[in-house]
Image: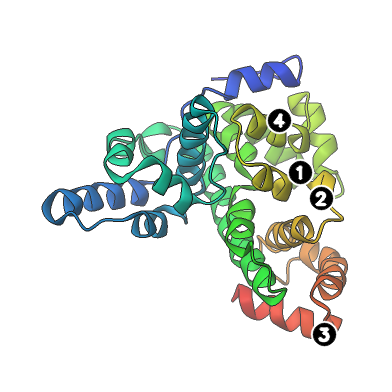
Amino acid sequence: MIDQALPNLSAWINALSDADIPVLPGTALDIAALHEQEEAKGNVDAHLLAQEISSDPLMTLKVLVHVSRYCTRLNIEPPESLTGAILMLGIEPFFKAFSTQTTTETWFTGRAQALEGLNKVVHRSRRAAHLAYSFALHRQDEDAVIIHEAAMLHGFADMMLWCHAPRLAQTLAERLEQDPALRSADAQKEVLGVQLVDLAPALMRAWQLPDLLIRCTDERHARHPQVRTVTLAVRVARHTQYGWDNPHAEAALPDDIADIADLLTLSPEAAYRKVHDLDE
C-alpha cells in the first residue's frame, strides 16, 4: 500500500502500472457462470462477455490493459472497444486469464470505509457512462460505444487510489467534502503531489491503451466534441452525486446545462429536461 505522496509523476506510474486490479463481486460471479456455460454448451461469445462485464470499470480496464500489452508484443494496434479486445484475445484465452479474480470485497477486508469510497466512484462512473452514451447517440457519433467506455473509465485513477493508496484517497475525499470551494486539482496536488488529470493519461500511455480512448478521457483536449461529451457527462455525475437539490449541484448545474445545450444544439430548458430524465 502507498501511505504517503510519491515524489513525482514517474514514481506514481511505476507504482501503479503493474499493480493488481480487483473486480466487483458481481463481475466475478458472472465470469464464473459464463465459464461454466462455455464448458457445458460452448456458446459464449465476445459480445455476451462484454455485455456482462462492461458495467464494471475495473474489469473493463483490466481486460483492455491485458489485451493492449498482448498487442504491443505482436506489434499491432490494440482494439478500441471491450468487445474488440475480447475478440482479439479469444474466448478460451479470456477464461484462462480471468476465470479467477480477486473481488473488491476480499481486497478491502477490514477496510469498509475504503470500499465505500471506491463504490462511490464506480457508481458515479456508471452514471457518467450512461449520460455520455446518450449524448453521443444524440450527436449521432459513430464512436458512441467508445465514448461510453471512456466515461466509464474516466475515474479509473481515482479507483486505483482507493485500491492502492486508500489513506491518501480518504484524505483527499475529506478535504474536498470539508471545503466545497476547494478545486480538486489543488487538493490532489497537495495530498498526492500530482494531479489526476496528468496521472490518468500517463498511466493509459504506459499501458499502451488505444489512442482514441486516451484522447476521450483526457480533459486537456476539452474542445474536441467527443472529449466534451465525456467531460460534461462526468461533470454532471460528479456535481449531482449527492442529489439534484444538493446546494453544490444547484450551484454547478447551470454552467453544466449551458455547455450541454451548446454541445447537443438544444435550448437550456430542453437540455436540462433531457439530462434530468436520463439520470432518473
Label 4 sits on residue: 202
Cα–Cα span, label 1 and label 4: 24 Å
Residue 56 in sight from this viewpoint = no
Disc 3 or disc 1, which is closer to the eye?
3
Residue type at numbered disc 1? Leu
Image point (62%, 64%), residue name: 144
Q: Earlier in the sequence, mark 4 or mark 3?
A: 4
Q: Which one is in front, 183 or 12? A: 12
Q: Position of residue 191 (x, y in %)?
A: 75, 27
Which badge, 3 or 2, is on the more N-terminal residue?
2
Confirm or deny contact between disc 1 and disc 4 (CB under 8 A).
no
Q: According to the image, label 2 marks what residue?
A: 180
Spot the residue most to the front: 75
Q: Are marks 4 and 3 in contact (CB under 8 Å)?
A: no
Q: Amino acid at mark 3?
A: Glu
Crowd band around label 1 with a 10 angstrom C-alpha radius: few (<14), some (14–19), many (20+): some
Relative to 87, 31 lies left or right: left
Q: Amino acid at mark 2?
A: Pro
Disc 1 designates what residue? 176
Q: CA distance from mark 1 to mark 2?
A: 6 Å
| Residue 32 as seen in the image, left or right of residue 13 | left
Check the image and report above or below for 90 versus 111.
Answer: below
Mark 3 touching mark 2, by CB under 8 A? Answer: no
Depth check, mark 3 against mark 2: the one in front is 3
